[in-house]
Image (cartoon, rainbow, N blue to C red):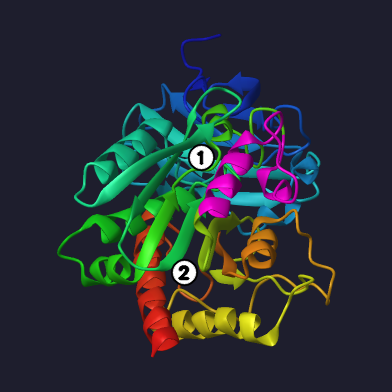
Amino acid sequence: MSTSDIVIDAAFDSGNIEIVSVDGATAHLRIPRDRNSEFAQWFHFRVSGVAGREIVLTIDNLKESAYPQGWPGYRACVSEDRDYWGRADSSYDESAGSGTLTIRYTPASDIAWFAYFAPYSLERHHDLVSEAAAAEGVDYRRLGETLDGRPVDCLEMGDGDKQVWLYARQHPGESMAEWWMEGALEVLTDPADVVGRALRKHCRLHVVPNCNPDGSFRGHLRCNADGVNLNREWAQPSAEKSPEVLAIRNAMDESGVDFAMDVHGDEAIGAVFLAGFEGIPGWSDAQGERMYRYQRILDRRCLDFQTAKGYPKSPPGRANLAISTNQVAERYGATAMTLEMPFKDNDDWPDAAQGWSPERCKLLARECLAALVEWLETEEG
C-alpha cells in the first residue's frame, strides 16, 4: 500500500463493510450480509488519510442487497465530527457491477465517516437509558437478555390506566428508530413538557428504545445475533432464537396493551407513514377505526407525515401474525401500528443538506406523542 492510499476501517460498534480494493483516494467496496442470513444493506465505515482530497467510493453488487429499490435516489450519510450527519453526492447505476453506488466527497479534515443512515451507537443507547432512568418517576426494567448477553432495556413511567407500548429497532439497521426514541424520551421525562405530563397522567408507558442491541452492535440490517428477523417471530418467539421478542411479549402479557407503536425505517419509500393491522382474524371496524383516527390526527398535526404512500393492506384474514403489529392487535385488541420513516428523504419536504435526519426523527417523535394525547382525550371524551 502506498502512503497516498486512503485507509478504511469498520472494526467498531455497528461497523460493516468489505474492502475489495483501494487505489489512492478511490475504493471498491461491498456490503457483507447479516450473520447467518441473506440480508445486506447496512454499511458504516471510517475513511482516513483524506484531507482535502476528493474520495470516490464505489459499492457494487447492490442488486443482491435486501432492498435494491433502496438505492435509486439514495445519498450516503457522511460526518466528520460524528455529531452532524449530512449527505454526500451519490449516484446509483443499475447496469454497472450488478448495481453500483458511487459516493463522492471531499472532506475538510483527515477522517470522514460514512453510513447508510446516521448511526445510533450502543454507548449512546446506554446514555439514553441511564439518563431517562434517572429522571423522576421513571422505572427501569431489564426485560430479558439477548443471545450475546446484552440487556433488553425498558423504561416505564406514568400513572394512568392506558397501557402504551413504544418500541423500536427490531431491525437494527433502521437507526432512525432510536433517534425517534431519543426524541420521545426527552418529551416524556421533561417536567416542563406538557405533552409528556399529559401522557404520564393518562397512561402507563412502556418504552423499549432498542429491541435488537446485538444486531445493532454487529452492524446488521435486519437480524439478531443468530440471523433471525425479530419482526417475524411474534407468533412463536423462542428463548433459543428470539429471546428479545419473547421478553417483550411476556412483559406485554403482564401489562396488557391498549396502544402500541413499533418504530421502523423504510429503504425505498421517501415518506413517513403508518402501517396497520388490516387482515387480522379478530379485525373489527371499531378497532380499525381507532387506528385510523390516530392516523388522521397525526396527518392533521404533522407536516412530515402523509397517507398517500405506504404499504398495501392485507386482505381479510390474511395478516401475518408473526409480525409485531398484527400480533399485538390480535392478541390484546390493541390499537397497534408500525411507524415508518425514510432512509432517503421526505419527498414532500426534501432537505438537500441532510435528507431525512436524526433531528427530524426526534421532532417527529414529539408530533406522534402530541397526537397520542389528542387521541386519548377524544377517546375518553
Residue 159, compared with residue 156, is above or below; it is below
Q: Nearer the viewer, residue 202 or 312?
A: 202
Identify the residue position indicated by label 1 in the image: 115
Nearer the observer, 124 or 344:
124
Residue 235 drawn in magenta: yes
Q: Distance between the residues labelled 1 and 2?
A: 19 Å
Could you say where residue 244 lies in the image, as x and y percent from the top left? 59, 38
Q: Which amino acid, by three-letter code, is at mark 1?
A: Ala
Residue drawn 75% across the image and 53% down it: 322
The residue under the point 34% across, 41% down is 140
Residue contact between numbered discs 1 and 2, judged by CB atoms under 8 Å = no
Q: Nearer the viewer, residue 27 or 86?
A: 86
Image height of 278 relative to 322, above or below: below
Residue pushed farthest left? 192
Work out which quarter of the rendered image holds the C terminus and state it. bottom left
**Callout 2: helix, strand or loop?**
loop
In the picture, the quarter occupied by the N terminus is top right
Of pointers 1 and 2, the one earlier in the residue sequence: 1
Q: Residue type at mark 2? A: Pro
The picture places residue 138, in percent across and down from the top left corner, at 27, 49
Residue at the disc numbered 2: 350
Q: Is residue 54 visible?
A: no
Q: Is residue 358 above or below residue 230?
A: below
Residue range (magenta): 228-254
Q: Residues within 10 Å of mark 1 (few under 14, many from 20)?
A: many
Is residue 28 shown left or right of residue 345? right
Does the magenta-highlighted stretch encompass residue 85? no
Question: Badge 2: few (under 14), some or many (20 or more) residues near its Cα, within 10 Å?
Answer: some
